[in-house]
Structure formats: C-alpha cells, structure tokens
Image (cartoon, grey):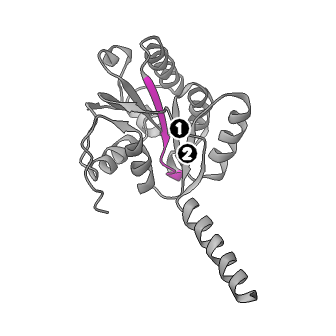
Amino acid sequence: MFNKKLLEFIFILFILSTSIMGVTESTIADEIVVESPYIVTSAGQSNCYQLFNSILKQYEVEPERINNLIVAEDLENKNSLVLIIGGNYKNLKMLEMEPEDEMNRMKKLIAEAKSKNIKTVSIYLGQPESFNNLSKSLMRSIFPISDYIIVVDSPEVNELLFVLEKEYKINFTIVDRLIQVGETFINVLEGEEVGVCNI
C-alpha cells in the first residue's frame, strides 16, 4: 500500500515537472494569434533582431520584412508587428541617434499599429549585453500596450512583467531557453507552413 502511494506521488511529481519544463510562467490568452504578413524590427538597436531572424529560419519561416529602422509607413498592409527589445548605445551612436529618438520611433510605430488594428508582439531574448536603462524604459512603455510578450527567463524582466500584470491586462510567456522563443512564437503564428526546428 505504501509503495503504491509512493509511486503515485512520484508519478504526479514527474507530470508536474514535465508540464512546466521550458515555460516558467504564462498568461497567454487563447485568442492570441500572430497573423501574417508580419514585420520585425529592433526596439533599442541591439542586434537581437538578427538573432531572432536566425531562430525563425530554423523553422523555415521568415517575416515579410526585417529591418532595425522600420517606421510607421512600413506597416501598410501588415497584420502583425514584432518588436525585439534590446538596447545598444554603441549602435545608436553609429546611427547618429539618441535614446530619445528610438523611444519616439517606437511610440509612433506602436501608435500606427494600434490605429490599424495591427497586433504587436514584444520579445526579449535574454541577452545580458542588451539589457540596460534603455531596454527597461522600452519595456515599461511597450509591454503594457503589446498584444503578446515573450521573454527569456530573467529576474529583472520577470519582476517588471509581474508588476505590470497587476496594472494592465498583459499576455506573456516566460521561457527558460533562447530556442523556446522560436517555439513559442511559432505556436501563435497563423498562416505559415512551419518546418521542424533542427537545433
């Protein structure tokens, strides 16, 4: 009798551990869908948007366009906007931009997306070098008005999400590993023929 109860307990623990493996926290709503065509841009001018594109290629899908300087006019005939958040002051300087310029680009871009009912997905890839004061400012302004958020597990970012969740109705998923960003994004991507990830 004791052994049977012990086995049942171990089995329950196993089910619980495997069901949460890879996803730390998620509040995603059932109706969240990323619709094609979608475009990808940087929010903060780190190179993480290129890393995200490399991840997508593992699934044999590509955005209609990917560019670090996409502006409101580029949203014409698009259904979704994907923002890859990561601040890089060096890249901003090379572009002769100030952090305020990037913040303003984001505000205009998101305002245009909202006016056209274009879904906005915000993603943080968990790269330490891309997390700084600019990233924090972008997250505070972008996360509350995003339709969906995907982040790689990061204590500071997680804390911010949980704070914002109390104030705003936000849909987010926190994943453990970088490759799971691709898996999570693909799961809500509509209208794409998706290949099998080979890494």
Task: Work out whether residue 69 or residue 118 is closer to the camera in this orientation and state it.
Answer: 118
Residue drawn at 28 percent across, 61 percent down: 198
> Residue 171: x percent and y percent?
58, 35
Q: Are marks 1 and 2 in contact (CB under 8 Å)?
A: yes
- Determine whether 123 is above or below 197 in the image: above
State the mark number for residue 149.
1
Q: Earlier in the sequence, mark 1 or mark 2?
A: 1
Q: Which amino acid type is shown beneath numbered disc 1?
A: Ile
Toward the top, the furthest residue is 115
**Residue 84, x across and y down, in percent:** 44, 37
Q: At x 27% / y 30%, what residue is drawn?
A: 65
Indicate yes or no whether the magenta region holds residue 48.
no
Q: Give the magenta-colored segment's residue range.
A: 119-128
Dot 2, how many residues are within 10 Å of its Cα: few (below 14), some (14-19), or many (20+)?
many
Residue 11 visible in the snapshot: yes
Q: Label 2, on which residue?
A: 173
In the rendered image, the residue lying farthest to the front is 1
